[in-house]
Image: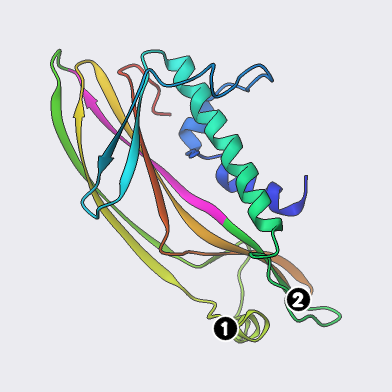
């Protein structure tokens, strides 16, 4: 496993699509688990307030739902690994003997789960608005001079921020729970600066969401 996949696993083994709470509840997948064996009971699509079309996966079995999420997660990381190694995404960076910045492609971070529970016996129309603020993060603290170093090495500004807001309107069946997963696609860089190695997560305007309709007793932690 290379450095990118390690970081991706640490950040992405949180959802999918995968959030930390889902990942923690997800069982280890055996080699016999395939997309065909854990197909959702039903798949629909819904449009959010921003016009984003996202999938809605229905499950009547919690184990099957967890396996599907874990499988989605594994496949997603593999696609990101392939993208990071493609010549169209990997950027070369100028380097000195001790300082360098490398670009590893898009990495998801800051995963969140939002639950809407319908404890009644009948279908309910439910709505929630998710607002998320993202900004550049580093794995270790850097001084003010690092921004200049980063810009010189990579050619883009170090500091970047993005606010995501979306309203989800959903019909949740009786005794079911709606699980909305949301993640930001951030650019991931590794750097060596002043003899210290660090990772940089720089958010983009690309946010991914998916909805799972699961049993009411589906764990939220």
Query: On the rendered image, what quadrant is the N terminus found in?
Result: top right
In the rendered image, residue 81, in percent from the top left (x then y), is placed at 67, 49
x and y percent of residue 161 in the render?
A: 41, 70
In front here: 111 or 212? 212
Q: Which image quadrant for residue 127?
A: top left
CB contact under 8 Å: marks 2 and 1: no
Tell me how many marks there are: 2
Residue at horizontal 48%, vertical 40%? 17
Q: Is residue 23 magenta?
A: no
Report the residue at 13% width, 16% height from top: 122
Label 1: state its secondary structure.
loop
Residue 138, image x, y percentages: 58, 65
Q: Position of residue 84 (x, y in %)?
A: 66, 57
The kind of secondary structure the magenta stretch mainly shows is strand
46 relative position to 55: left or right: left
Mark with earlier residue (2, 1): 2
Secondary structure of the residue carrying tag 2 is strand
Counting other residues with Cα less than 10 Å from the Cα at mark 1, is it few (<14), some (14-19), or many (20 or more)? few
Say whether residue 29 is left or right of residue 51. right
For residue 144, which numbered disc appears in the image?
1
Marking on residue 100: 2
Residue 115 shown in magenta:
yes
Q: CA distance from mark 2 to mark 1?
A: 17 Å
Which of label 2 and label 1 is nearer to you?
2
Quadrant for the C terminus in the image:
top left
For the residue pair 5 and 43, the one nearer the viewer reads as 43
Which color scheme did the rendering employ for the protein?
Answer: rainbow
First to last magenta residue range: 107-119
Q: Is residue 132 left or right of residue 30?
A: left
Is residue 190 placed above or below 5 in the rendered structure? Answer: below
Quarter residue 177 falls in: top left
Q: How busy is the neighbourhood of tag 2: few (under 14 within 10 Å), some, or many (20 plus)?
A: some
């Amino acid at each position: 496993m290379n450095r990118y996949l390690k970081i991706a696993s640490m950040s992405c083994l949180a959802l999918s699509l995968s959030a930390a709470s889902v990942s923690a509840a997800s069982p280890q997948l055996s080699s016999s688990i395939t997309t065909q064996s854990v197909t959702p009971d039903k798949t629909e699509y819904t449009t959010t307030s921003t016009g984003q079309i996202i999938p809605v996966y229905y499950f009547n079995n919690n184990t099957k739902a967890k396996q599907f999420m874990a499988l989605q997660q594994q496949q997603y990381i593999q696609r990101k690994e392939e993208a990071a190694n493609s010549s169209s995404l990997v950027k070369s960076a100028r380097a000195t003997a001790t300082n360098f910045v490398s670009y590893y492609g898009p990495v998801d971070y800051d995963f969140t789960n939002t639950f809407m529970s319908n404890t009644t016996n009948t279908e309910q129309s439910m709505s929630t608005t998710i607002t998320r603020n993202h900004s550049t993060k580093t794995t270790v603290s850097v001084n003010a001079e690092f921004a200049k170093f980063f810009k010189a090495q990579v050619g883009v500004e170090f500091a970047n921020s993005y606010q995501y807001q979306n309203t989800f309107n959903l019909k949740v069946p009786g005794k079911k729970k709606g699980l909305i997963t949301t993640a930001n696609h951030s650019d991931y860089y590794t750097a060596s600066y002043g003899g210290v190695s660090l990772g940089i997560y720089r958010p983009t305007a690309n946010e991914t969401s998916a909805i799972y309709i699961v049993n009411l007793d589906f764990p939220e932690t």
